[in-house]
Each structure stands twice: as C-alpha cells, then as structure tokens.
Amino acid sequence: MVAYRLKKEGKQVSYNDLLRFNYYFGRALIENDGIRLSPDEMKWLLEKHPGINYPTFIQDNFADIYFTDEENAWIDQTITNIRQLDNPYKFAIAFFALCQAAIVKRPYNLFHRKNLYIRFADVKRSFGNKVTWDRPFEHWFRMFAEEANQAVFNNGKTNHAFNYDAVHVPGDYDLVYIDTPYISKRGVAVDYFQFYHLLEGLTMYDEWDKYVDHTSKHRRLKPRLSEWINKNRIHEAFDYLFKRYSESILVISYRSDGIPSEADLISILRKYKRDVRVEHFGNYQYVLSTNSRSGEMLLIGT
C-alpha cells in the first residue's frame, strides 16, 4: 500500500493506497504555495519543438484501446514536453492537467478495458457525456491547468507531499485519515493500480515497457501483490495500520457492506482506541457497481 502524506493548514493527513501519479497532484496543490504555469508555458507545452526527440510509446502500444491515433500522438508529445520542465511544481501542475484530461475523456473515467468504441458508437446513451469525450485534449489540459493555478495559495505553513508505504510514513500526527481500496462482500476488490494504470505508466515513461503486460488486451501493468485487494489479508492489514497510528486520532472511510464488515472494523479499531463512533452517509455507487444498498461510512477512533 502506498501512503500519501499531506500537510496543509497546519494539519497532516495520511491517505492510503494512492498511486505515484497522485503524488504529483499533491505537489501541485498541497506542497506548492506560489508557483503557477503561465499562459506562455501552457502554449509551449502544447506545441511540437525542433530539437526534442518525441518517443511514440503510447502510439505504438495503445492504438485503438483508449484514445484515437491522433490523441495518442498528442499524449506522447505532451508528456515529452512536460518532462522538459525543470521546476518541480510546474511539472506537477502540467502532469496533473494531463492526467485529468485523460480521465475526463474516458468512459467511466477508467482504464479498465479496451472500449474506445463506446465513444463513437451510434447508440442511445444512458450514461456518459459524449460532448466531453469529443472535446480535444488541449481544451481539457488548459482548463485543468488553470484550475490547478487557481488552487495554489500560501497559507503561511510549510507543506509537504510524500509517497510512502502507509505504515512507513515517518513522524507522529494528530490525525490520520485512511481511505483504502474497497473489497465488496463478494470478495471483489477495487484495484486502483489497474483502473489507472495508464496514468501510472506516464510517471515512468522511459521504463514503462518493462512493466506492461503485453498479453492483456488493454495493456495493463503487470499485477502486483497487495494485502489491500486480498480478502484473506485485509483484516490483518487494517490491524497493522491502526496499530502504527494508535497515538493519532483515526478517521477511516469505507463502505458499509464490504470486507471487513462494519462490525469487524469497529472491533479492530477498539483494540487501539477507547472511543469509537461511526457516521453513515448516503448511498453512493461506485462506477460499474450494481449495488445500490452500500453506503459510505466514517469510523472515528479517539
């Protein structure tokens, strides 16, 4: 499990099982207190330049899977330009904008299967937004870059974003927020590593080919083991995580009908916390989920 430590407004929070591309989101919006992308820099990022070698990895490996040939070429070009940026916060903002643009142009906002045809099928649609899908990447890149620019502010604090395994985040904290992947009561896990593998690949563009499962139709990354998507190990994982942050206020976000169950999570949390309460919220379905009875809950241990 990967942890993402945020510090803003003088508070520190631990987010669980986020991928490396999210680290750049944190640098752009949490750690960054004053750096923005200028209009000229955005323009430069969206153009092809002599003297820069533009690889074609996405064009060569992801044709007819997620985006059109023209869009794949645009991504190869833009990520190459982004990687020319020396300032880490400008890089982070541009990377954030690229990833958000890729997500918004995807049916279900996921990279879980080869289904480019959905965008162009001449059918009556009960979901999705074809207008959004058909807008060019450049439109979305500029919009999300400007959104990130507007979110940058200086709160007078020193803010940091880090990427660690959750149990190895150094330091002590007043409050730790935990939002792990969800395993349904049928034992089916939400695997963010596979849902967003294309974005994860962009974080290691030069080495991407070593980690691609070329036998899969949608060119996923080779599977990795994680206790957070294993129904037989997730109880132990929660226990270990709660123990690591037993001196902090713990706030855990989960689904009401998952594995572990609500009762199991309460039982584990009470090993380390004297007072445990649960707050329930409305029913929010995950993408692709057919379960309308599962609700969001927060467990709070003090």
Image (cartoon, helix red, strand yellow):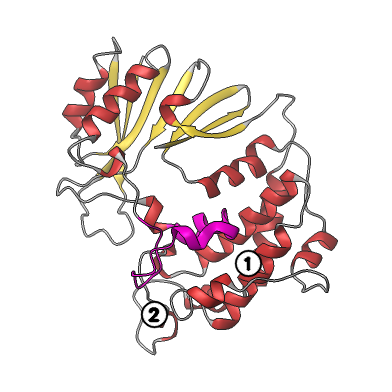
* Quadrant, the C terminus: top left
Q: Residue at x 64, y 55 (%)?
A: 95
Start and end of the magenta stretch? 196-222
Marker disc for residue 140: 1
| Measured Cα–Cα span from mark 1 to mark 2 | 20 Å
Name the residue carrying label 2: 118
From this viewpoint, which residue is outermost toward the left?
186
From the top left corner, tell me how far across and down residue 71 is, in percent: 58, 77
Residue that extends furthest to the bottom in the rendered view of this protein = 122
Residue 135 in view here: no
Residue 189 located left or right of residue 171: left
Q: Earlier in the sequence, mark 1 or mark 2?
A: 2
Whether 215 is among the magenta residues is yes
Dividing the image into 4 quarters, which one contains the N terminus? top left
Magenta-span inclusion, residue 13: no
Residue in the image at 16% along x and 28% along y: 263
- Mark 2: few, some, or many residues within 10 Å (few <14, many ≥20)? some
Residue 55's label in the rendered image is none
Amino acid carrying label 1: it is Trp
Q: Residues within 10 Å of mark 1 (few under 14, many from 20)?
A: many
Q: Quadrant of residue 247?
A: top left
